[in-house]
Image (cartoon, rainbow, N blue to C red):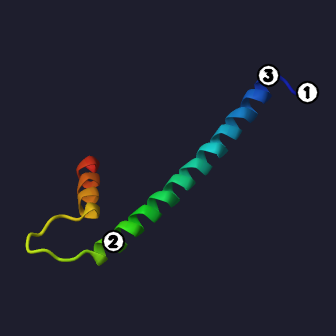
Amino acid sequence: MFNEREALRLRLEQLNNAEIQIIRELQSERKDIYSRLRELDRQKVSSSHHKKTLLELVDETVNLLKK
């Protein structure tokens, strides 16, 4: 018999699956963005003043947030 408890359990399972899919999509997009940033950094013309690349700034921020 299908009752409210079973319906709620099923919905939680559906939400979990949806969350996993969204997380995977975001991770994939983040990976693509980092890849493109690295590509752009390699193409960057060197200047006499060393400025941190956007990727370096992002990595630095991530490391600070991990602490």
Separation of disc 1 and disc 2 at Cα?
Answer: 59 Å
* Marks 3 and 1, how far apart at CA: 10 Å
Element on which disc 3 rests: helix
- Where 32 sits versus 5, above or below? below
Query: Looking at the image, which residue is at 70% across and 40% down?
Result: 14
Image side of residue 56 versus residue 5, left or right: left
Residue 4 is tagged as 3
Per the rendering, the mark at residue 40 is 2
**Amino acid at dot 2:** Leu
Residue furthest toward the right?
Answer: 1
Q: Which mark is residue 61?
A: none
Relative to residue 31, is residue 13 drawn left or right? right
Q: Is mark 2 on a helix, strand or loop?
A: helix
Earlier along the polypeptide chain: callout 1 or callout 2? 1
Disc 1 residue type (three-letter): Met
Horizontally, residue 33 falls left or right of residue 41, namely right
Give the position of the N terminus as an image quadrant.
top right
Residue 13 in the image, given as x and y percentages of width and height: 69, 39
For the view shown, which residue lies furthest in the left direction? 48
Q: In this view, does 32 lie above or below 27?
A: below
Query: Are there few (<14), some (14-19), or many (20+) residues within 10 Å of tag 3?
Result: few
* Disc ID at residue 1: 1
